[in-house]
Image (cartoon, rainbow, N blue to C red):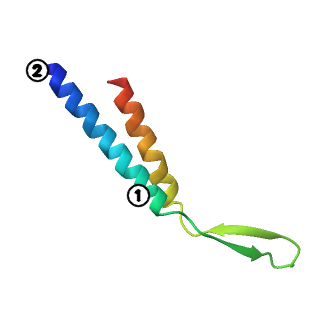
Amino acid sequence: MASKLLMISVFVFDVIAFALAIAAEQRRSTATIQTDNEQVYTYCVYDSIFQLDLALAPSYFSWLDKSL
């Protein structure tokens, strides 16, 4: 019984990790090029950091899965 419960929990963690990875791929950050006030340097400004959190979440679920 414990073996079946473990297999089910591992499967659920894998499905969650896969779904979060797909969501992270769908929601990629976009960048705009900005120039500083003195017009010397240009740099990129990204619109959101949420995508990074969404991309790291599958890794955490995968590590949790492997630790079981």
Q: Earlier in the sequence, mark 2 or mark 1?
A: 2
Relative placement, left or right, of 18 versus 3 is right
**Compared with residue 49, is residue 15 higher up or lower down, i.e. above or below?**
above
Label 2 element class: loop
Label 1 element class: helix
* Quadrant (top left/top right/bottom left/bottom right) for the C terminus: top left
**Compared with residue 62, is residue 26 higher up or lower down, i.e. above or below?**
below
- Give residue 46's position: percent from left, percent from top: 62, 67
- Give residue 6's position: percent from left, percent from top: 22, 26
In the picture of the structure, the residue carrying the numbered disc 2 is 1
> What's under tag 1, amino acid-wise?
Ala
Tag of residue 34: none
Q: Residue at x 30, y 43 (%)?
A: 15
Q: Residues within 10 Å of mark 2 (few under 14, many from 20)?
A: few
In the picture of the structure, the residue carrying the numbered disc 1 is 23
Q: Nearer the viewer, residue 26 or 29?
A: 26
Occupied quadrant, residue 30: bottom right
Q: Nearer the viewer, residue 38 or 25?
A: 25
Q: Residue at x 52, y 54 (%)?
A: 52
Occupied quadrant, residue 12: top left
Q: Residue at x 41, y 54 (%)?
A: 22
- Give residue 51's position: percent from left, percent from top: 49, 58
Residue extending furthest toward the left: 1
* Quadrant (top left/top right/bottom left/bottom right) for the N terminus: top left
> What's under tag 2, amino acid-wise?
Met
**Compared with residue 4, is residue 51 higher up or lower down, i.e. above or below?**
below
- Give residue 49's position: percent from left, percent from top: 53, 60
Q: Residues within 10 Å of mark 1 (few under 14, many from 20)?
A: some
Answer whether labels 2 and 1 touch (C-beta < 8 Å). no
**Compared with residue 27, is residue 2 higher up or lower down, i.e. above or below?**
above
Relative placement, left or right, of 22 versus 8 is right
